Image (spheres, grey):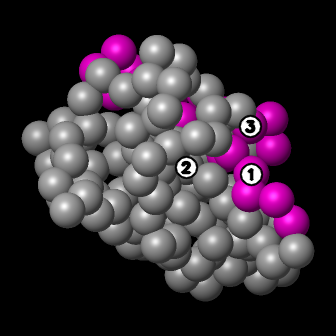
């Protein structure tokens, strides 16, 4: 059974940092896209960052470019999202996703994934 488990969320003040982790079990991150998304109640889920495992290409939403960094640890089968200079508008539930249906592409606009985590809450206060 495939599980994606996010961790590392929490409450921070504006300007602070958090590092989110997405650990997979029953699935190996390999040569496919992995994405981080966020969602606030009443709004659509938004693609934040994506990484092509193995190739290392990364993609970011304009709203987080220069502040967030997505990375992979192949040995730990984990994908990270380092979030710096956090703003109150970054407050959301953050999800990771793996095994895209369109496995040959990668990017933040890719939304159809076979596996999703349960999410980790990030709250940024001003």
State whether residue 116 is above or below residue 58. Answer: below
Q: Earlier in the sequence, mark 3 or mark 1?
A: 1
Secondary structure of the residue carrying tag 3 is loop
Assess whether mark 2 and mark 1 are in contact (beta carbons under 8 angstroms): no
Q: What stretch is highlighted in magenta?
A: 43-63
Task: Give the x, y percent position of residue 74.
Answer: 19, 37
- Going 61% across and 84% down the picture, which residue do you hit? 11
Q: Quadrant of the C terminus?
A: bottom right
Instruction: Look at the image and say whether residue 56 sits in the magenta stretch.
Output: yes
Badge 3 is on which residue?
61
Task: Give the x, y percent position of residue 92.
Answer: 71, 71
In the picture as drawn, the residue positioned furthest to the left comes out as 75
Label 3: how many Cα within 10 Å (few below 14, some 14–19, many 20+): some
Badge 1 is on which residue?
46
- Going 81% across and 77% down the picture, which residue do you hit? 41
Secondary structure of the residue carrying tag 2 is strand
């Amino acid at each position: 059974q495939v599980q994606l488990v996010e961790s590392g969320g929490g409450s921070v003040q504006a300007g602070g940092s958090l590092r989110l982790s997405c650990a997979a079990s029953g699935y190996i991150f390999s040569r496919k896209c992995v994405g981080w998304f966020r969602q606030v109640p009443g709004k659509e889920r938004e693609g934040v960052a994506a990484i092509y495992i193995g190739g290392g290409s990364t993609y970011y939403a304009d709203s987080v470019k220069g502040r967030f960094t997505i990375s992979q640890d192949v040995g730990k089968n984990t994908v990270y999202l380092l979030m710096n200079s956090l703003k109150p508008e970054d407050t959301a539930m953050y999800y990771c996703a793996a095994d895209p249906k369109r496995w040959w592409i990668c990017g933040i606009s890719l939304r159809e994934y076979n596996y999703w985590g349960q999410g980790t809450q990030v709250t940024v206060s001003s």
